[in-house]
Image (cartoon, rainbow, N blue to C red):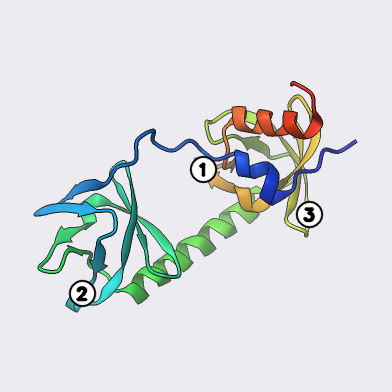
Amino acid sequence: MMNKFAAASALACMAVSAPALAQEAVEAQNGEVTVGSTVYGPQDGIVGTVERIEGTNVVVNTGTMEATLPANVFAIGENGPVIGVSKADLEAAIVAAQQEAAAALDAALVPAASLYSADGQVVGTVTEVGADGLVVVEHNTAGPIQLPKDQMTVQDGNVTLLATAAALEAAVSAQTGAEL
């Protein structure tokens, strides 16, 4: 019997662990970039807002998209943090990166591909990629399970689930009611 996972519920508990303490600021050229700051581009055009800081990366929300940028691309101008691209150029780069990532995943996500966890462990083998967005995986201990394709990416050339092996095990155990 195949264990079915609903994309919204079962994987909700499978987040890749974030840094224990949220950062409020990160060093940039000539100052700090802080959460909540407005980010400007060339000619002082507004690009977006600093949503959060993740290590040495800054997540900028353009209002419709998010981009994770290294802190070293920011300078501090008269109005606040500045980057070298406009909002339109940043959003175009995000779309291009998403399309490239989707194409890489489509090419790698084939039957017999190993599925890795976010922490680098092989957790199973892909057996089928459904048109419905679900991927059937022969899990190492639970047998066949379905996982949402939108929770997968290609990392270091491997099809990778955006969850740790422990989080997947916990979700599988919760669905099946058995400890694995």
Residue occupied by mark 2: 42
Q: State the residue at coordinates (46%, 66%).
A: 96
Residue occupied by mark 1: 155
What secondary structure is marked by label 2? helix
Sequence-wise first label, 3 or 2:
2
Q: State the residue at coordinates (54%, 36%).
A: 118
- The N terminus sits in image quarter: top right
Disc 3/disc 2 C-alpha distance (Å): 44 Å
- The location of residue 92, given as percent across then percent down, is 41, 72
What secondary structure is marked by label 3? loop
Q: Circle 1: is it few (<14), some (14-19), or many (20+) Cα within 10 Å?
A: some
136 relative to 165, above or below: below
Q: Horizontally, is 10 left or right of 14 in the view? A: right
Camera sees residue 29: no
Sequence-wise first label, 3 or 1:
3
The amino acid marked with disc number 1 is Gln
Q: Horizontally, is 1 left or right of 126 in the view? A: right
Residue occupied by mark 3: 130
Q: Quadrant of residue 167?
A: top right
The amino acid marked with disc number 2 is Pro
149 relative to 174, above or below: below
Camera sees residue 164: yes
Q: Quadrant of residue 114?
A: top right
**Residue situated furthest top in the rendering:** 179
Q: State the residue at coordinates (34%, 41%).
A: 22
Q: Circle 2: is it few (<14), some (14-19), or many (20+) Cα within 10 Å?
A: few
Disc 2/disc 1 C-alpha distance (Å): 33 Å
